[in-house]
Amino acid sequence: KAGLEVPEAVLEAPVQVEATLEVGDVLYMPRGFVHSAETDPTAPSFHVTVAISTHDWTLAKTISDLVRQCLDSHSQPTYRLAAFPFHIPKVEQQLEHAMKLIKEQVTVDAISKSLTRTYHRHNAVAFQARSSFLQKVAVTKKNASNLKNNSVGEKIVGPEASIQIKLGTMVRASTQEERLSVRSNPGGLQGLTVREETCPFLMSILQHLKANPDTFCRISEFSSLLSSSSSSCQDTEYNEATCNSSTLADDLTLLCFARCCVELGAMAIVSS
């Protein structure tokens, strides 16, 4: 990671933890632990990864910050001056004094207080980001609600439309005009990303709707959309890979897929 190779001794060492995560389980992965994860290829799988700036919590980072603060804040500017190779004899004298300062100020208590400040700073940043996100969601929901109450301006494609989607929502392929009406959001979705095992089935749904623009379908009935139009899994449209991947597309997968398609403008909601 970060250009550093994992030592062979680490890779060859015995596995410390091997577990199967079930619904509701949480696994904490400390910094520096080599890990590998895989899902059951025959069943749907969903997970959320929460990453933090782990380098801020290492002892190396904490001590180095305290050492820099200790020397930078010294009353004499000695440690803030540039150091050159031909000043080494002088640096040796300063090093002894610096080590004395560090030993006096970089203590266990100072490390504890520094980590506490980092903890509060991270919480403040996270709270601000969370508040900003919830505010944007509230505004989007309000706009979607206003549009829903106003049939003239009802949205059927785009982010505001996608929030309205439920499993019982009817969708169809969008028109070119509808696709062009969706504004690109720099901080939002830029393309569909789906699990490799479900990709054949989900892409076949989208292709089928595009090939049959007059077809409307409830999201919960996506699974039957292709099977009803194909006599067997050997059909060119509903081939074996598509058939196999359909078993991994549960309701949550179909709902997320439809919401992404509507948000990006690939599908449109059938207005009631």
Image (cartoon, helix red, strand yellow):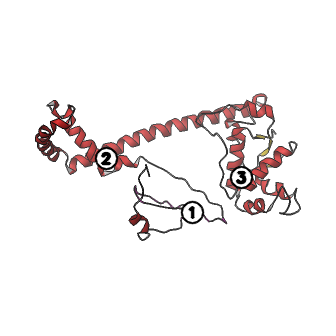
Label 2 secondary element: helix
Q: Is residue 24 magenta?
A: yes
Task: Give amino acid for label 3.
Answer: Leu
Quadrant in the picture for the C terminus: top right
Would residue 89 be found to the left or right of residue 34 on screen?
A: left
Label 1 secondary element: loop
In percent of the image, x 76 and y 46: which residue is there? Answer: 169
Task: Give amino acid for label 2.
Answer: Lys
Q: Which residue is mark 3?
A: 254
Residue 227, position as x, y percentages in the image? 84, 59
Badge number at residue 38: 1
In percent of the image, x 49 and y 59: which residue is there? Answer: 26
Label 3 secondary element: helix
Residue 110, position as x, y percentages in the image? 22, 46
Magenta segment: 19-43
Q: Is residue 154 visible?
A: no
Query: How many angstroms separate mark 1 from mark 3 (CA)?
Result: 22 Å
In percent of the image, x 57 and y 56: which residue is there? Answer: 47
The earlier-in-sequence mark between 1 and 2 is 1
